[in-house]
Structures are given as structure tokens and as C-alpha cells.
Amino acid sequence: MTDRSRRRVLAGGLALGLVGGAARGEEPLTTTPALELGPFYPVLRPTDTDADLTRIAGRSGRAKGEVIQVMGRMVDQRGRPIVGGKVEIWQCNAAGRYAHPSDTHTAPLDPDFQGFANLTTDSNGEFRITTIKPAPYPAGPGWMRAPHIHMDATGKAARSTFQMMFDDPLLAQDRVVTPLSPADLAMTLARPLERGADGVARFGWTMLMLEG
């Protein structure tokens, strides 16, 4: 089994465990590993912060890149949905550039990419976004960040920062995630879901929060 296949098996097992473990009342589930906020947390937030990051209110264009959808879920250590949780989401564009004054990457900005969302989980603890699959980008001499989306999540009693990673060969040298164990890395990975009738790639991701 390849490393990539092993990560997919681990991620799939986590998704099944959320349902089975919570139903059987087993020991609390392991929380999703918190990762650094990163240097590009938005300092100037866009006025448009809805769930569609591919369009900006008042503009007719659409962001460049591969459009994807992410179906997220916020749960506690018993697998119970966290209703009314707050999730801030930000990411680079399809060229690997953040709309942030400290990002010195020479890739172009995309004037049609929102790059940030501020959402609330529904009655099932769920949220979803339409966005662009982020590109890798240089993070320093000799290494690259693998594609990822940042999330700052606030539940009823806890706040954590996460990075939802996409399965990519660059994970092996991304210094943000290389310290993680294989099991912890698997918990950060977006799970590929069946494409919709519109052909858009869909991903699932669950954040397990420590809620007391």
C-alpha cells in the first residue's frame, strides 16, 4: 500500500468512527490536530464574506482555477454536532497568492477571488463553501506549502485553528505537517466525495473540537 493510499484509508476510518463510536458511547474521539494560524490571516477582510469564494458581490467575473465544494462539519469528542459554531475560512488563490500585504510571492492576485468566508454551522453542525482549489506555494528556501485551506473555528467552549490539507506529494516536505503522526495527518486531509452532476469536485472534512 502506498503512503497516499494509507492516508485515504485512515481518513475513511475516521469518518466511519465518528458515527460508530458516538453511537456506541465509546471513549471520547481524538480531536483534530490544531495547526498554526499562519502569517496570512486577513488583516483587511473583504466586505463580501459569504460561502461562495469564487464570486465577489458587485463583480461579474469568477475566480480563476478549479472550482470545488467543501462540505464541513464541526463536532465534539462524542461525535455530536456543534450547532451555531463559527468558522472563518481563508486561503490562497489558484496561483498560490494571498491577498495579504505580507505575502511577497510574485504570483498574481485574482480580483475576482474572495479568499475569505465567515460562516455559522447549521442544525447538523455543518457548513459548506464553493471555492477554488488552492495552489502550492513557496514558503521558504527549499520547501513548499502543500495545498491547504485555513479554518479558525469557535465552538461553544473552545477555539482552534486548523488547516484542511489536500492529498498531494508535497505533504512529504511541508514543514507545517511533517511533525504529525500518520494518524494525525490523516485527520487533516480533505476526503474526496463523488462529483456532482455539474462535474464539480467535492470534498468532505470534519473538525473534532475539544468542548469540555
Image (cartoon, rainbow, N blue to C red):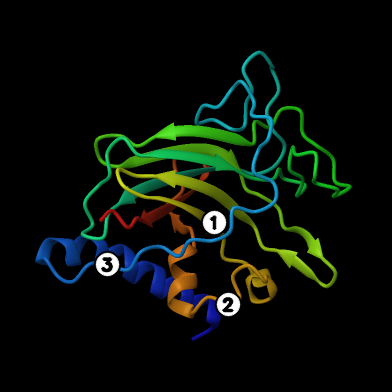
Label 3: element kind: loop
Q: Residue at x 25, y 56 (%)?
A: 212
Label 2: element kind: loop
As measured in the structure, the alpha-carbon distance from the residue carrying label 1 to the one carrying label 2 is 14 Å
Judge whether 200 appears above or below 144 on screen. Answer: above
Q: Residue at x 86, y 48 (%)?
A: 104
As measured in the structure, the alpha-carbon distance from the residue carrying label 1 to the one carrying label 3 is 19 Å
Whether residue 6 can be seen here: no
In the rendered structure, the answer to whether residue 119 lies left or right of residue 75 reads: right
Judge whether 72 appears above or below 56 on screen. Answer: below
Q: Nearer the viewer, residue 76 or 186?
A: 76
In the rendered structure, the answer to whether residue 96 lies left or right of residue 31 reads: right
Whether residue 107 can be seen here: yes
Q: Which amino acid type corresponds to the residue marked 2 in the rendered image?
A: Pro
Q: Give the residue furthest to the right.
A: 106
Q: Which mark is residue 29?
A: 3
Whole-percent x, y for residue 2 in the image: 53, 83
Q: Which amino acid type corresponds to the residue marked 3 in the rendered image?
A: Leu
Dividing the picture into quadrants, the one containing residue 165 is bottom right
Q: Nearer the viewer, residue 66 or 139?
A: 139
Dividing the picture into quadrants, the one containing residue 24 is bottom left
Label 2 or label 3, whichever comes before in sequence order: 3
Label 1 or label 3, whichever comes before in sequence order: 3
Q: Residue at x 63, y 45 (%)?
A: 91
Q: Which mark is residue 163?
A: 1
Q: Which mark is residue 179?
A: 2
Label 1 or label 2, whichever comes before in sequence order: 1
